[in-house]
Amino acid sequence: MLVLGGGILWASDHADAPNTKGKTTDITDLYVFQGANTNDLVFVGNVQGLLSPTATQTAAFDENTLIEFKIDNNGDNVEDLVIQCVYKGGKMYIYGPVKPSQTGTSSTIVGTASVVVPVTAYGASTPVTVTSSTGIMAFAGPRDDPFFFDLDQYHKIIAGTAPGFNNPGHDTFAGTNVMSVVVEVPKSLLNSTGKMGVWLRTAQKN
Amino acid sequence: MKRNLYTIIGLCALTVMLGACHKDKQTTPSDPNTGETFSVTGDQVGRPGIATVFIAAADKDNFNATIPSMMNAAYGAKIQTQLTALNPGYTTNLLGLSAAQFTGVLATDVLNVSTTGTTTYYDGTNVLTGRKLTDDVIDVSLILIFGGPTNAANPTLTSDHVDANDKAFLTAFPYEAAPW
């Protein structure tokens, strides 16, 4: 690992940086894809990776942590819209998509929630979902980590103790969970011009 | 709280009897988070693996605090160095990109998404038009880093041979599988 510049830990973004490792701000993955209804786009923001089933029983979102999707509509890599997700009192409040009050690293919650969804409890037989009058669907709660990768073998390769991957490989993320927010949004609410750029940020109150 | 509620219900019932319960005079429902500011940087992710593979440990927290429009200037050179360290034999990749061109794609860690059609990280035809749950983003990344112009180079490094998730995804919202 050190040979190649130090500290390579390719787990998508799981436990990636010292300041976020093991914290409620630690993002694992971002997914954005067309919904089952092709008029919609689905935004998936996952945090708190590598949760065992036991750890998932007590895992929770953090009222102090904002989970925010940033959306660039015009290719300048500056957000034009945001979807802001804030946990409060057992529910996930989802704001936007809306123009942010300012761009960059400080985020202020804009307006009132578009949709509020109770967090699905671990062990619930069906996921709790809520749809707003504007057609925004929301879910928040523990899910199986959708990421898959033979990370252990990759570590061996990078460390110089293995020449390559095994076939078949072993999914290091098998049997682990994440805390997930899923928001499905009608494309008509996204100022879509054919393409956009999306990134996911977490931030905390000062 | 409960007692107050009963009092209000009682008053309202009394008022109804008197002919007017002004429910319509309520203002906009209060929102517990409106105006709250979150200014302490946490984590930041666009595409899978960019920060983890290409950003050195000492830079990771700063990378998370760097806005995407500034990433190329701040990290482009370091990312190209890392790319050629990972694959000293890098010439071009399956997309025909030189190390400098590929670095230009990698350095701004934003997920490109099509709003008009197929959304996939790479499906053999569409490139970087989104990221589906089923996309094997690791193999795509390995191929682009190690596979050379025809994906014939470094055959033991271009797939981890984990091609799908450990649970089937749902066909309907919220798409992700139930937790273990």
Image (tube, coloured by chain):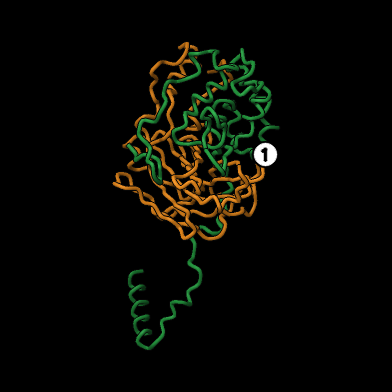
Q: How many marks?
A: 1
Task: Write the residue at 29% across / 46% down.
Answer: A125
Q: Is residue A15 above or below residue B36?
A: above
Instruction: Name the side, left or right, on which A116 lies relative to B50.
Output: left
Q: Is residue A81 above or below residue B139?
A: below
Task: Write the residue at 61% across / 21% down.
Answer: B82
Outermost bottom residue = B18
The picture quadrant where one finds residue B109 is top right
Q: Is residue A23 above or below residue A167?
A: below
Q: Chain of mark 1?
A: B
The picture quadrant where one finds residue B60 is top right
Q: Secondary structure at mark 1?
A: helix
| Residue A113 percent coordinates (x, y) | 50, 58
| Residue A89 percent coordinates (x, y) | 41, 55
Outermost right residue = B73
Instruction: Name the side, left or right, on which B125 lies relative to A63.
Output: right
Going by the numbered disc 1, the residue's amino acid type is: Ser
Q: Colour of chain B?
A: green
| Residue B124 percent coordinates (x, y) | 53, 27
Q: Is residue A82 above or below residue A29?
A: below
Q: Which residue is mark 1?
A: B69
Instruction: Name the side, left or right, on which A115 lies relative to B112.
Output: left
**Which class describes the residues within 10 Å of circle 1: few (<14), some (14-19), or many (20+)?**
some
In the image, the chain rendered in orange is A
| Residue A206 percent coordinates (x, y) | 56, 49
